[in-house]
Image: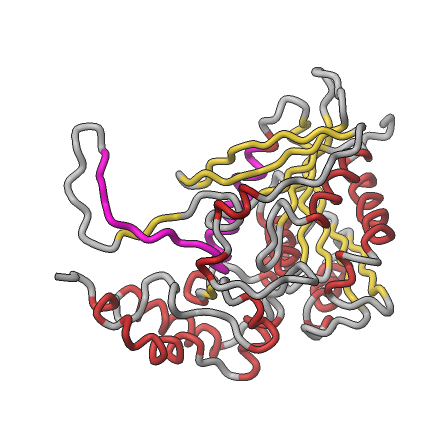
């Protein structure tokens, strides 16, 4: 006999979907469309098709002769995350490099060719570059949700349970933890100067990188490109999020979105992704940047098709500037959201690495 109410209600998934996804037009703009991502030729996947095994089997493109890559395991709250560290080839054992931690947007993983290019070019400029998959994304292990009552642990604290693998969650609270642990990992690398670490985020990862720059003292410089900053939140957002939280806590709907929570509209191609607004109440970029002191560069697309940049990157840049903190804001005319991963990548990456150089490199480097 199933012990929790939501298991009895899975046959009513359509009803649950409506209860979770009902939002006003303003909420959708603030919470959904601005939390965007990557690759410009993303195929349409079902959730079960975007497996960890498939990403592990996907080969890397060849590396240039002057760059090396090592695959690493990053522990985040007890779950293994898969990461790649890019370094200049033959770097001396006693050399301490500045480091960049890359933060992906929707569906972004470390084996995407455009993100591999970021690692290669950063290493060529003298950086250690960490590209990683969030928990439950790409090659990283899944978090687990037990589907039945947990038995008593044995003498070693071990249990055998029936569980669901939780994957592809848009869960900012957990992803903030993942980024913190990625920073912790790179800070411990032998060739890294832990006092010179930057974060580099794209799409909704640009918002996460901005939030981290405002809240984590280890971050000394940040770049956010085509960023979805999450929108300014009002009473309707919090009413929706806390109502959903109550329903999840009581087992009246799925405690973690699985059959429900898939994006729609312009985000429908990412149908393997699951939104969970109740987990995102801890994350507010606009409040965070009111105290930001870390140097921040924002790159927006002049032909951005997925959000109003004046209410996203443009507004954040304005807030930071009014606080007299170091900020550069650039709008690339003629570029679309996804153009930053294609024809515009080379020119923009030079700007971004110059920004990191300014704040993370020593004068004699």
Q: Residue 341 at what x, y percent from top left?
A: 75, 56
Residue at horizontal 81 percent and vertical 70 percent from the top: 302
Magenta stretch holds residue 167: yes
- Residue at the bottom extreme, as displayed: 25
The answer to whether 154 appears left or right of 216 in the picture is left
Residue 343 visible in the snapshot = yes
Q: Residue 253 at what x, y percent from top left?
A: 30, 70
Magenta stretch holds residue 217: no
**Total marks drawn?**
0
Residue at horizontal 81 percent and vertical 49 percent from the top: 349
Q: Is residue 250 above or below residue 194?
A: below
Quadrant holding the N terminus: bottom left
The answer to whether 248 appears left or right of 61 in the picture is left
Residue 286 visible in the snapshot = no
* Protein image colouring: secondary structure
Front position in the image: 120 or 27: 120
Q: Residue 241 at what x, y percent from top left?
A: 42, 71
Q: Residue 293 at what x, y percent from top left?
A: 69, 49
Front position in the image: 55 or 22: 55
Residue at horizontal 69 percent and vertical 39 percent from the top: 100
Front position in the image: 53 or 295: 53
Quadrant holding the C terminus: top right
Quarter assignment of residue 105: bottom right
Q: Is residue 58 above or below residue 224?
A: above
Residue at horizontal 27 percent and vertical 74 percent from the top: 11
**Residue stretch in magenta:** 158-185
């Amino acid at each position: 006999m199933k012990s929790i109410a939501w298991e009895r209600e899975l046959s009513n998934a359509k009803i649950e979907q409506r209860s979770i996804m009902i939002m006003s037009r303003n909420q959708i703009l603030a919470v959904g469309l601005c939390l965007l991502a990557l690759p410009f030729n993303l195929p349409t996947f079902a959730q079960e098709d975007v497996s960890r095994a498939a990403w592990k089997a996907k080969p890397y493109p060849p590396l240039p002769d002057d760059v090396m890559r090592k695959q690493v395991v990053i522990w985040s709250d007890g779950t293994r995350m898969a990461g790649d560290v890019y370094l200049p080839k033959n770097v001396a054992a006693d050399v301490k490099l500045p480091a960049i931690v890359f933060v992906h947007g929707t569906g972004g993983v470390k084996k995407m060719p455009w993100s591999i290019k970021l690692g290669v070019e950063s290493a060529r400029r003298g950086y250690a570059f960490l590209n990683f998959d969030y928990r439950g994304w790409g090659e990283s292990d899944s978090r687990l949700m037990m589907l039945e009552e947990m038995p008593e642990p044995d003498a070693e604290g071990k249990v055998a349970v029936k569980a669901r693998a939780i994957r592809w969650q848009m869960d900012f609270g957990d992803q903030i933890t993942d980024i913190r642990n990625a920073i912790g990992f790179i800070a411990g690398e032998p060739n890294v100067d832990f006092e010179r670490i930057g974060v580099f985020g794209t799409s909704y990862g640009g918002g996460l990188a901005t939030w981290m720059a405002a809240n984590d003292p280890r971050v000394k410089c940040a770049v956010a490109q085509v960023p979805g900053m999450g929108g300014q939140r009002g009473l309707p957002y919090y009413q929706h999020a806390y109502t959903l939280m109550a329903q999840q806590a009581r087992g009246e709907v799925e405690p973690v979105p699985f059959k429900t929570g898939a994006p729609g509209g312009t985000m429908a191609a990412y149908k393997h992704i699951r939104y969970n607004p109740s987990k995102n109440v801890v994350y507010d970029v606009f409040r965070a940047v009111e105290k930001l002191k870390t140097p921040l560069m924002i790159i927006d697309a002049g032909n951005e098709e997925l959000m109003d940049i004046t209410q996203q990157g443009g507004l954040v840049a304005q807030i930071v500037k009014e606080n007299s903190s170091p900020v550069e804001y650039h709008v690339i005319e003629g570029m679309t959201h996804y153009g930053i991963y294609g024809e515009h990548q080379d020119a923009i990456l030079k700007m971004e690495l110059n920004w990191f150089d300014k704040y993370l490199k020593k004068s004699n480097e």
